[in-house]
Image: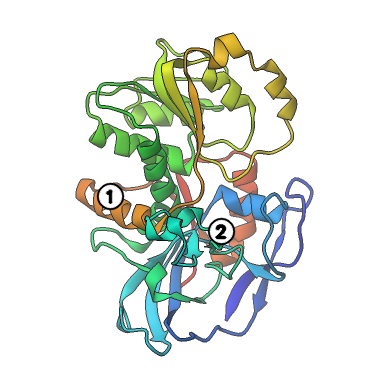
Amino acid sequence: MKAMILKEITDLSKNKSPLQLADIAAPEPMDGEILIRISVCGVCHTELDEIEGRTPPAKFPAVLGHQVVGRVEGAGGKADKFKKGDRVGVAWIYSSCGECRYCIEGNDNLCEEFKATGRDEDGGYAEYMTISESFAYRIPEVFTDTDAAPLLCAGAIGYRSLRLTELKDGQSLGLTGFGASGHLVLKMAKHMFPNSNVYVFARSEEEREFSKHLGALWAGETQDRSPQKLDAIIDTTPVWKPVVEALGNLNTQGRLVINAIRKEEIDKNYLLNLDYPRDLWMEKEIKSVANISRKDVVEFLELAAQIAIKPQIEEYALEDANSALVELKEGKIKGSKVLIID
């Protein structure tokens, strides 16, 4: 099968072609697994972290990609949840132990044996992949394949982030960073909290104008002060500056939710600007988002189908995955990037 593979950790700012097109053996489904013929796979910022070593793959060569949509092509023994031809999706969560307290509570995203699609096991930058049928999801008919792919990560992790803010209708919400996840969170927030205003902080004028087009009341640069203090802010950036700036915009008892698997070291010194009385006093909180659970994916897909969330999409051929990744690295983002596999 065709696949774009990563052979080693590399710096994307120096190496513009970190992935290589290769012909590799298609996987065979084991007991309880399904074989998926992949039609599309979303491109996520986490792939940059994998390529550059902040959250490295478990093995090399690696097949990245964790926003996968395709059709069931076959099944191993004891796998009977889906039939051949069913359309399914795969998200960041590839597997968990199923037995620890976190798995039992429905927080399998926190399991110590959590495995990630496209990092710990091969993912969707290929024509086929296998996964346990318990970690595959039916895609609502309302979505095309390309519409569905970003929902499986950017949408689902955005949904978890929004829940973790504990926002109440009428309270104000800030979004710092406005890429694939941010634009879907804004759509969700407008539906779930119709009386809440959304404020966006983004680097580029294009992103700011895009956010206002989607319903943001106000949009400014990362370091700007919002017209009012905000009750909750979700940070989706890979760096530290927006965290410090966001804390300065939080209201008393406000909560900052950081939706990022890693933070880059390039501006770590910015943390020296953190001022306790200004930024953390008055019972402000910081909470991280760790992965997504199966429950998040199921609930979000149901919600997305109800309110017909449609992501902004940029399409690329599988062979052009490097171009999509470099554009993501350079901040050339408007919505979600999706690779067309089949």
Identified at 30% across, 64% down, the residue is: 139
Rounded to the nearest angstrom, the CA distance separating label 1 from label 2 is: 29 Å
Kind of residue sitting beneath label 2 = Glu
> Residue 336's x, y, as percent?
46, 48
Kind of residue sitting beneath label 1 = Ala
Identified at 37% across, 79% down, the residue is: 72
* Residue 259 seen by the camera: yes
Query: Callout 2: helix, strand or loop?
Result: loop
How dense is the environment of label 1, judged by Cα within 10 Å: few (below 14), some, or many (20 and up)? Answer: many
> Residue 12's x, y, as percent?
73, 49
**Residue nearest the viewer, comparing 188 with 79:** 79
Identified at 49% across, 25% down, the residue is: 285
Pointers 1 and 2 in contact (C-beta within 8 Å): no
| Farthest residue, direction front | 101
> Residue 18's x, y, as percent?
72, 59
User: Residue 59 appears in which quarter of the rendering?
Assistant: bottom right
* Residue 221 seen by the camera: no
Q: Earlier in the sequence, mark 1 or mark 2?
A: 2
Vertical placement of residue 49 versus 143, above or below: above
How dense is the environment of label 2, judged by Cα within 10 Å: few (below 14), some, or many (20 and up)? Answer: few
Q: Which residue is mark 2?
A: 112
Rendered-image quadrant of the C terminus: bottom left
Q: Which residue is mark 1?
A: 304
Vertical placement of residue 210 versus 55, above or below: above
> Residue 239's x, y, as percent?
64, 33
